[in-house]
Image (cartoon, rainbow, N blue to C red):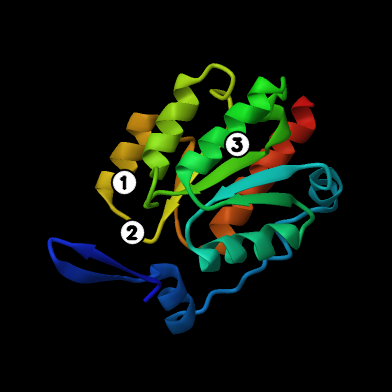
Amino acid sequence: MTAVTETEGKLLEIIDVERILSEVCPQPERFPEDIVTADIARLVSSMHLLIVDDSAVAYNQIKRCVEGIGVKTTALNDGRQALSYLQVLADESVNVANEFLAVISDIAMPEMDGYTLTAAIRADPRLADLYVVLHSSLSGGFNQAMVNKVGANAFRSKFLPDELATIIVNRVASRGHSG
């Protein structure tokens, strides 16, 4: 349990699904060594990833994984914080699509969910070119349909280091060739 809230006069326990999964079914937190080539390792040192997740366990899994190959990370724990942060950067004339390799966002968060965050990013011309990956502990057709509807670039289930590695390596390679 990570929190308690009251709804309709009853206490409701809120659990951290990622924490439970990490304890019951631990996953490796490193990229497979054969995925990261010397060229990728060289390019990645100047790249930055924005991680948006209300679960400290999920954030730390991603952070340990990507920082192991040299990607810098910034963490925010809610979509509303992330949107505000990105808008402030854009207000300061930062090209956020160049600043961040990608935004990896949880879907279910308390103040603003990942779907709403992605839709807001796509609606703001200063942010619209950001590469957005939504991830969730829950999978299914509904999530994929919503991912497509809001304009996310990808959807991944938590926590699959091989899939995360593939996304990061492909993004690094495309950025290395284009800039």
Q: Which residue is mark 3?
A: 85
Q: Secondary structure at mark 1?
A: helix
Q: Nearer the viewer, mark 2 or mark 3?
A: 3
Q: Where does residue 161 sit, x and y in percent of width and height?
A: 58, 62
Q: Where does residue 70 sit, x and y in percent of width and height?
A: 79, 55
Q: Earlier in the sequence, mark 3 or mark 1?
A: 3
User: Which dot marks residue 116?
Assistant: none
Res 163 quadrant in image: bottom right
Question: Does the image show residue 8?
Answer: yes
Q: Residue at x 42, y 43 (%)?
A: 114
Measured in 3D between alpha carbons, the distance from the residue under mark 3 to the one under mark 1, in whole angstroms, is 25 Å
Q: Where does residue 49 sit, x and y in percent of width and height?
A: 66, 45
User: Which dot marks residue 143?
Assistant: 1
Image quadrant occupied by the C terminus: top right
Depth order, front residue of 17/167:
17
Q: Residue at x 33, y 30 (%)?
A: 149
Q: Earlier in the sequence, mark 1 or mark 2?
A: 2
Horizontal side of residue 84 vs 72, given as left or right: left
Horizontal side of residue 156 vs 100, given as left or right: left
For the view shown, which residue lies furthest in the top direction?
Answer: 125
Amino acid type, label 1: Asn
Measured in 3D between alpha carbons, the distance from the residue under mark 1 to the one under mark 2, in whole angstroms, is 8 Å
Depth order, front residue of 106/66:
106
Res 123 quadrant in image: top left
Q: Is residue 70 above or below residue 143?
A: below
Check whether the beta carbons of the residues at disc 1 and disc 2 lie within 8 A of each other.
yes
Amino acid type, label 3: Tyr
User: Which dot marks residue 138?
Assistant: 2
